[in-house]
Image (cartoon, rainbow, N blue to C red):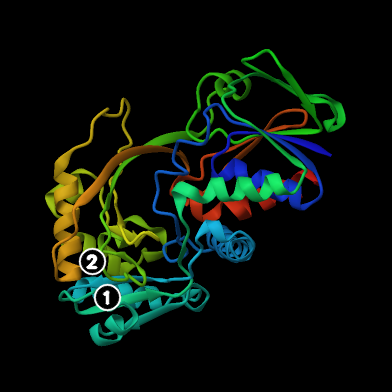
């Protein structure tokens, strides 16, 4: 079988990976020289801890297993099974962590509640004051800016993979029986195959609207930053208690009490913020994030959210942050029904659109692509 994948972000690249793994030939088309969207502008976290139960958690756990296996074969991914810590400062926040620990799927997530001394044994860089910390053993990390490059290098070595950058797809056609599906690019070249996967990320207009109509997927904008090297290991990812308000795994009466009894910092509330932080292989810290849902999005970045994040991080580390080296904004695609892991739609015979995983894209992409491959009978 010959599979044409459109879009070289992590979702598209993982579809190419699974097709090649199953012995198929892949032509991979990308409108830029390489992916430039959400697949690079994220934390690189394989984030199991906050996922909703059921399908979302099952997908995240399967993806975590796949990431580890792929990481062993592709060292350039920088896969690290580092886990995460969420320090809590008071009884309201502690009660949410305790409620999470009481979930029936807590063991599958690797939840443990640690006192400050135990947390610092796991992550000595956390020298600030906190009451306890929720540890999630199953969380992990990869390097988002280089992951697609490393995967592509491995795919090229297979001899079954062709990468065609700087080509924008203009038309897609399918045929009965998933034979002779065709993609025409902006150079006028037509690429034929047995199946087409459109992994377009947040590019939801143009071709996508033409062939799929208005789909139940929205765009979300975020702001993030990265520092110079910390000068010491940050041995886990780190979140703050505002992440409890954001991730569905923490829904509970205790969370209701937190929301009613402890207001967010005004800046955090205005920008729908949480702290997530992970250390890069060069020692720098990737820190974020904000959430903006209403269009049109701002074209600039705002300083107040960065200043809030710096205060929170420094309170956990008990020391000043290194110099901030980079600031950026990104946009990703999220299903409007946020309980859905992904929007997967057959748009023509042999042609499938796969988009909208939201903030789960980096985490869940290997399992999302595996499911597509299974459903299409690759």
Q: Position of residue 80 (x, y in %)?
A: 48, 67
* Cβ atoms at labels 2 and 1 below 8 Å apart: yes
Viewed as shown, does residue 66 lie left or right of 160? left
Measuring 31% from the left and 38% from the top, which residue is drawn there? 329
Q: Residues within 10 Å of mark 2 (few under 14, many from 20)?
A: some
Viewed as shown, does residue 158 lie left or right of 266? right
Calculate the distance from the C-alpha at mark 2 to the C-alpha at mark 1: 9 Å
Is residue 123 positioned above or below 229 on the image? below
Q: Nearer the viewer, residue 101 or 154?
A: 154
Q: Is residue 50 visible?
A: yes
Q: Which residue is mark 1?
A: 95
Viewed as shown, does residue 199 lie left or right of 140? right
Q: Which residue is mark 2?
A: 257
Measuring 31% from the left and 68% from the top, which residue is drawn there? 253
Q: Nearer the viewer, residue 277 or 216?
A: 277
Element type at marker 1? Answer: helix
- Residue 58 position by quadrant: bottom right
Marks 2 and 1, the one that precedes in the sequence? 1
Q: Is residue 341 visible?
A: no
In the rendered image, the residue lying farthest to the top is 188
Q: Position of residue 75 (x, y in %)?
A: 57, 61
């Amino acid at each position: 079988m010959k599979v044409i994948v459109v879009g070289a972000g992590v979702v598209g690249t993982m579809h190419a990976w699974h097709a090649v793994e199953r012995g198929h030939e892949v032509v991979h088309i990308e409108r830029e020289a390489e992916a430039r969207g959400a697949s690079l502008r994220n934390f690189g976290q394989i984030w199991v801890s906050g996922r909703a139960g059921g399908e979302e958690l099952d997908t995240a756990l399967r993806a975590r297993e796949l990431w580890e296996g792929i990481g062993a074969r592709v060292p350039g991914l920088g896969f690290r099974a580092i886990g995460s810590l969420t320090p809590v400062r008071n009884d309201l926040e502690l009660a949410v962590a305790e409620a999470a620990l009481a979930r029936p799927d807590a063991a599958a997530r690797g939840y443990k509640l640690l006192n400050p001394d135990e947390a610092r044994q796991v992550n000595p860089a956390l020298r600030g004051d906190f009451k306890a910390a929720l540890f999630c053993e199953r969380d992990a990390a990869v390097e988002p800016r280089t992951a697609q490059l490393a995967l592509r290098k491995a795919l090229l070595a297979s001899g079954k993979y062709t990468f065609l950058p700087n080509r924008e797809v203009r038309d897609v056609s399918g045929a009965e029986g998933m034979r002779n599906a065709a993609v025409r690019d902006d150079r006028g070249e037509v690429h034929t195959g047995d199946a087409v996967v459109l992994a377009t990320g947040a590019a939801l207009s143009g071709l996508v609207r033409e062939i799929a109509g208005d789909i139940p997927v929205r765009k979300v904008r975020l702001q993030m930053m990265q520092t110079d090297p910390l000068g010491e290991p940050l041995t886990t990812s780190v979140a703050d208690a505002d992440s409890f308000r954001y991730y569905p795994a923490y829904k509970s009466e205790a969370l209701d009490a937190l929301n009613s009894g402890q207001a967010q910092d005004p800046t955090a509330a205005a920008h729908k913020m949480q702290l997530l932080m992970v250390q890069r292989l060069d020692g720098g810290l990737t820190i974020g994030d904000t959430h903006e849902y209403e269009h049109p999005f701002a074209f600039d970045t705002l300083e107040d959210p960065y200043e809030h994040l710096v205060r929170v991080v420094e309170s956990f580390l008990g020391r000043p942050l290194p110099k901030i080296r980079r600031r950026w904004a990104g946009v990703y695609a999220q299903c409007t029904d946020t309980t859905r892991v992904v929007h997967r739609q057959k748009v023509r015979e042999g042609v499938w659109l796969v988009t909208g995983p939201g903030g789960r894209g980096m985490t869940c992409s290997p399992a999302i692509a595996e499911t597509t491959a299974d459903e299409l009978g690759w």
